[in-house]
Image (spheres, rainbow, N blue to C red):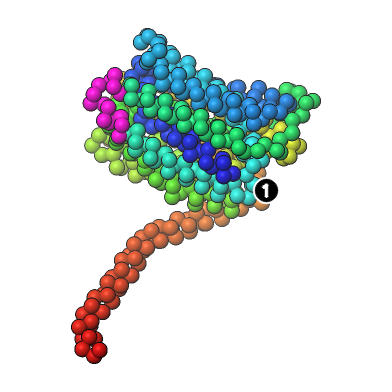
Amino acid sequence: MWYVTTAWVFGAAWMYTTGVGAAPTRYGRLLGMSDFQFGLLAALLSASAALQLPASYFVERYGFRKSVLLVAGIIHRALWLAIALVPWLLPRAWWWPGLVLFMTASASFSNIATPGVLSWFADLVPERVRGRYFSRRAQIGQFVGLAMTLIVGEVLDLATPLGDEVVRRTISLLFTAAALSGIADFVTLTRVPDTKHHPDPTLRLRTLLLKPWRDRNFRWFVGFSATLNFGLIYVGQYIWLYVFDVVGMTNRQANFLLMIVPILIGLVSYPVWGKIVDRWGCKATLIVAGVLISHGAAAWIFVTRETWWVGYSAAVVAMAAWPGVDLASFSLLLRMGGSDDGRRQGSAYIAANSLVVAAAGLLSGLFGGSMAKLFADWQGSLFGWPMTYHGLLFLISGGLRLLALAWLLGLKEPQAASTLTAVRYIVGALYSNMQHAVYMPVRRLIRFGRWAYTLSRWRLLRPVLRLFR
């Protein structure tokens, strides 16, 4: 578990440079990608998850779980070296096709590694502490992410006045460093043993395909994941395009609002949600957190050039609740994906879930790209606030997030607390934390004042005391 956490330090540096932030969006623009092509890229990245199914079958029948995930993971990260070198190696006409090709290839090897990685983690981390462990792991990654976001934002803002060519070369160098860090992530995992997994040489592909779908609980969970991801996948690309093209933010401003603030909020909220998952169960956590994130995308409609704080204040609530959805979903998937000392093919659940989510992501990316193309010049308003096609996409995302919660009603979780009990606990915990945050500085100030007053009195009495020596 210590090596898994240490490896994530390198993995987080890679992710916060290449997977999220201003750099990937700027890079795509500089290589000639249009709004529709951003949606196409999101669709292709999601479609590559179909490779998880044959990867799961190979691992469950022939073994080599650790070898498969390490080799595929290292290739996945190494391909970012090729992505970084696209402007250097390819003619200008092939820049954006080359970017799409290499990013899709990288995502493909990532998906080959995924079933083995998650099944491995499920066997490695005890269920009773998963919420707390992965919340702490996420915290450490966010500390790294905060540093990388600040560095990348400052570097890009320094390069921007020097022209597009300098910015393009700067991002290439950033991606090169990130790729090396990402490779170090999987190299560190070589020290982690793989002892619980036992392959089944008699396993048939048909059995592997059907096994997860015979589990009623899995079907409800997949419905939730697919609906939620359909409303989420395209949003990530178009929020960045919205803040750059419509709101007119700089790299520094966009990174601050979309990266730094969510990371700081996550550093506080991840431990709280981790305890909630371990104590009250995944279903209750998903319902409560799912309601709190439902407005997260629609709130960006009210972020404009003149007044950004109105919509952003509402978006902050969703940012604080997102760790609850993330940890609870991940814990549920790990529970289904464990090998149970070789008595079940848990990676099949992970692959089947990823396949459905990939289909949802593919449709989501195509949907977002098509909407961007059809309504590129559309102008409207909502309650007096101006809207572009981005706003339509954000409203649809909010509706889909609420619709996804309906799937949770059929989810069964043994020994889990009721949703109402979890709500009471969450409200109490938030009130306690807010009270602590407000009163702690006041108490410290009062204590400092008393100490200073006592010290000043002793200083005044020193000349008098000397007379009696």
Image position, residue 186 (x, y; %): 55, 32
Any magenta on residue 157? yes
Left or right relative to 382: residue 47: right
Q: In this view, does 74 lie above or below 118?
A: above
Please, what is the three-letter code of the amino acid marked with disc 1? Answer: Pro
Which residue is farthest front? 469
| Residue at 30% across, 34% down | 154
Could you say which is closer to the camera, residue 274 or residue 384? 274
Name the secondary structure under disc 1: loop
Could you say which is closer to the camera, residue 251 or residue 406? 251
Left or right relative to 120: residue 242: left
Q: Is the magenta stretch mostly helix, strand or loop?
A: helix
Q: Name the residue under label 1.
A: 414
Any magenta on residue 181? no
Image position, residue 17 (x, y; %): 41, 31
Could you say which is closer to the camera, residue 167 or residue 413? 167
Among the 4 quarters of the image, the one containing residue 335: top right
Image position, residue 29 (x, y; %): 34, 20
Among the 4 quarters of the image, the one containing residue 203: top right
**How many numbered tags mark residues here?**
1
Question: In the picture, which quadrant includes the N terminus?
Answer: top right
Q: Does residue 396 show up?
A: no
Image position, residue 23 (x, y; %): 36, 28
Start-end of magenta stretch: 154-167
Q: In this view, does 299 lie above or below 129?
A: above
Q: How crowded is mark 1: few (under 14 residues within 10 Å), some or many (20 or more)?
A: few
Among the 4 quarters of the image, the one containing residue 221: top right
Question: In the picture, which quadrant includes the C terminus?
Answer: bottom left
| Residue at 23% across, 77% down | 459
